[in-house]
Amino acid sequence: MERELPTSLLMFIASRAAADRVFSAMHEAGFTDVTIAQARLLMGLDTEGTRLGTLADRAQIAKQTATALVDRLERAGYVERVPDPSDGRARLVRMTPRAKAALPIARAEEARIEAEWEAHLGPKRMGQLREALTALREITDPYQSAHP
């Protein structure tokens, strides 16, 4: 008998599938110079910019790895480092117009995924899923206030 998968693994499988689709849509739209690791790091960026250490924490990677990924993203024109207005010694990593141009493509694919999931689950179950996952953020997302 096959073991029942834990809820956390089921959520990861769905999340990974969605992330892979968004990544593929980006590539199909011509943003082929971003790796999946770089894309995951970009997902952790706040609108006004984010400190490198925070990006590393969100991506669950070493700060040195995050630095190397940001260096490559900067060379490709997706991010820039700017002074942190709250601390003159610190720097923020911020999206450039090139990265912002990719956002509508990602958002459109996210909308297609949501529509497919709702068609599969039905509006009521999809609403319950969203409600449950939103409630789980209260105990699972240490950066909840940073991601509206």
Image (spheres, rainbow, N blue to C red):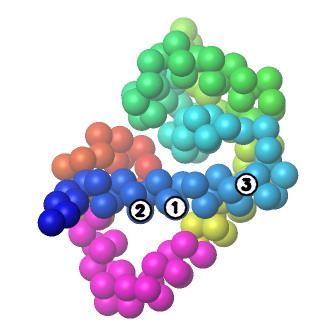
Instruction: Determine the secondary structure under disc 3.
Output: helix
Q: Viewed as shown, does residue 126 lie left or right of 49?
A: left
Gap between marks 1 and 3, in whole Å?
Answer: 12 Å
Residue type, label 1:
Ala
- Quickly name the residue at label 3: 26
Label 2: state its secondary structure. Answer: helix
If you read the primary sequence from the N terminus, does the residue marked by circle 1 or circle 3 appear first?
A: 1
Residue 20 picture location, percent across and down: 58, 55
Give amino acid for label 3. Met
Relative to residue 61, is residue 23 drawn left or right? right
Most distant residue in the front direction: 1
Q: Position of residue 132 (x, y in %)?
A: 24, 69
Judging depth in this view, the residue of 78 and 120 nearest the camera is 120
Q: Could you say which is closer to the camera, residue 33 or residue 88?
A: 33
Name the residue tied to disc 1.
Answer: 18
Q: Earlier in the sequence, mark 2 or mark 3?
A: 2
Please tell me in which quadrant of the rendered image residue 134 appears.
bottom left
Q: Which residue is mark 2?
A: 14
Q: Quadrant of residue 124?
A: bottom left
**Place of residue 9 in the rendered image (x, y in percent of width and height, measured from the top left):** 29, 54
Front-lying residue, 94 or 64: 64
Looking at the image, is 56 positioned above or below residue 105?
Answer: above
Which region of the structure is painted magenta? 112-133
In the rendered structure, does residue 69 fall within the stretch colored magenta?
Answer: no
Res 122 seen here? yes
- Residue 54 horizontal/vertical position (percent): 44, 27
